[in-house]
Image (tube, rainbow, N blue to C red):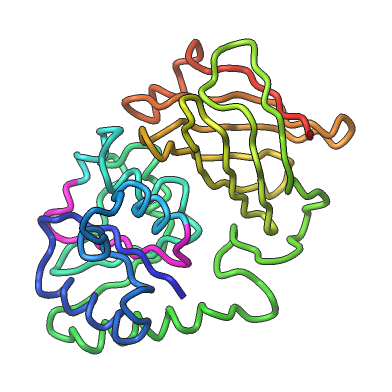
Amino acid sequence: MKVAISYRRADDSETLKQLLAALRGRLSDENVYLDVESTRIGENWMLRWLDAYGSADCILLVIGPQWRPDRLQESSDPVLLEVSGRWERIIPVLIDGAHLPQRKELPMAMRPLLMRQAHVVEAQKLAESIARLLEGLERDRQPPLGWGKHLWSFRGPAPGISFDLTGEWELKSSASVPFTDIHIEQSGRVLNVWASGFYNDEIVGEGWVGIDRPIVSFTLASKQYGPAGILVLKYDTNSVMLTGRWMPPAQSMISALFSRLRHKKVSLKRK
C-alpha cells in the first residue's frame, strides 16, 4: 500500500513527525511519500511529485492550525494541486486541534473535502489516535466482496457500467488544445489518462465515470508546466465517441466553469 501525505509546511509539528514515523514503521519508507523527505538530491521533483500523488493508494490530507484555506484560491497552490480530482483516495486528518474549514472558505474544487469523513488525531491520545488511523488503512487494503474502498473506486466491473474506454484515442478540436493523442485505462469507474502534449510534453490525469449516465471527467496535469485543465465528456455508445469540452486552467474553478468562452469543444475517436 502506498500513502502520500499532503500538508502545509507551517503545520510540520511533532504530531506530523510521529504520524510519519508510524506510517513508515508499518508500511516502509518507500511506500510513504512526504515531499522533500522523499525526493532524492538532483531528482526531478515535479515528476516525483506527480508520480507519488498519482500512484498512491491513499492520500492523507493533514490539516493543522496553519492550514490556511484562503491559499486554496490560488490555482498554483500545492495542496490544491495535490488533492483536486483525487477525492476517492483522500482521508482528511485533523491534527493539533484543527477543524475542517467551513464551506464558504473553500473554492468549488475543494468542497468535496467536506463530504469526506475526517480522522482526528488527539494530542492527549496521540499514540492511540495514530494506531486507529493505521488500523483503518489496513482494513481498506482488501475491501470486502470485491467492492472498492469508496463509492468511486471500484476495482472490477462496476454496477451500471456497460462500456470500457481502455485504449488509444485521437483528440480533435476546432480550437487549439495543448495535447493530442490520448491513452485511457479504465478500472470500473476509475480512469487514468496519458496524453501527448505540445513541446514533447507528457500530460497525465485521472478521472471517473458518472454513476447514472455516461459522463466522463478528467483532471489533467502537465509534467513540465503544472495544471492542464479539465475534460468533461459524454460517451455515445452508438458512435463509440467521446464528445464534450476541455476547460483550461483558470485562477479559480468558478471562473473556469462560468467563462464559457474559454471552453473548447473536443471529440475523441478510437484509433
At 51% from the left edge and 43% from the top edge, which residue is drawn? 204
Q: Quick check: is 192 in the magenta stretch?
A: no
Determine whether, in the image, residue 167 is placed left or right of residue 257.
right
**Which region shows up in magenta?**
55-68
| Above or below for 133 versus 58 | below
Q: Where residue 168 appears, x then y in whole percent?
A: 72, 40
Q: Residue furthest right?
A: 238
Observer-nearest of 40 and 36: 40
Observer-nearest of 47 and 108: 47
How many numbered marks have been drawn onto this rendered protein structure?
A: 0
Q: Where residue 91 appears, x then y in whole percent?
A: 38, 65
Q: Quadrant of the C terminus?
A: top right
Determine whether, in the image, residue 18 is placed left or right of residue 107.
left
What is the quadrant of residue 13 in the picture? Answer: bottom left
Q: Where residue 112 appears, x then y in whole percent?
A: 43, 49
At 25% from the left edge and 58% from the top edge, which residue is drawn? 35
What is the quadrant of residue 170 in the picture? Answer: top right
Observer-nearest of 146 and 173: 173
Determine whether, in the image, residue 18 is placed left or right of residue 138.
left
At 50% from the left edge and 38% from the top edge, which residue is drawn? 203
Observer-nearest of 121 and 165: 165
Determine whether, in the image, residue 96 is placed left or right of residue 63.
left
Q: Where residue 258 appears, x then y in whole percent?
A: 45, 19
| Above or below for 198 versus 83 | above
Q: Quick check: is 65 in the magenta stretch?
A: yes
At 19% from the left edge and 78% from the top edge, which residue is drawn? 122
